[in-house]
Amino acid sequence: MPDWVLPRRRQIGARIREARLAANLTQAALAERVGREHRTVHRWEYAQRVPNLEDLLLIAAAVDVPLADLVR
């Protein structure tokens, strides 16, 4: 894997976390809205797992931000 991938995953995870907090949601509440477990949300936020496109679309809708803001 190229060296830039992990830092980029961390950036996306941080943006997911920021958007979740701005929407005043807990990890559990976001997980419920997107149909995943709260552990999965934690793993996305800390770059332990990568959300797929469907997950990113659901997250963006749940926190009411454009998808581009999560992955820019």
Image (spheres, rainbow, N blue to C red):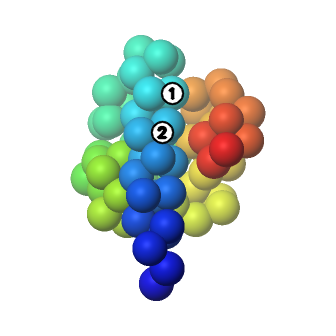
- Residue at image x 61%, y 41%? 70
Left or right position of 52 against 39: right
Q: Is residue 3 above or below residue 35?
A: below
Q: Residues within 10 Å of mark 1 (few under 14, many from 20)?
A: many
Q: Secondary structure at mark 1?
A: helix
Of the 4 image quadrants, the one containing the C terminus is top right
Q: Does the rendering let one see residue 40? A: no
User: Mark 1 is on which residue type?
Assistant: Ala
Residue, far bottom: 1
Q: Position of residue 56 (x, y in %)?
A: 61, 51
Q: Is residue 20 above or below residue 33?
A: above
Q: Position of residue 29 (x, y in %)?
A: 37, 31
User: Mark 2 is on which residue type?
Assistant: Ile
Q: Toward which corner of the image does residue 24 lie, by quadrant?
A: top left
- Residue at image x 66%, y 61%? 53
- Residue at image x 49%, y 79%? 2
Left or right position of 30 against 63: left
Q: Secondary structure at mark 2?
A: helix
Of 57 and 29, nearer the camera is: 57
- Total tally of numbered discs in the picture: 2
**Marks 1 & 2, CB-CB < 8 Å contact:** yes
Q: Residues within 10 Å of mark 2 (few under 14, many from 20)?
A: many
According to the image, label 1 marks what residue?
A: 19
Q: Does the rendering let one see residue 23? A: yes
Q: Position of residue 25 (x, y in %)?
A: 39, 23
Of 23 and 2, nearer the camera is: 2
Q: CA distance from mark 1 to mark 2?
A: 5 Å
According to the image, label 2 marks what residue?
A: 16
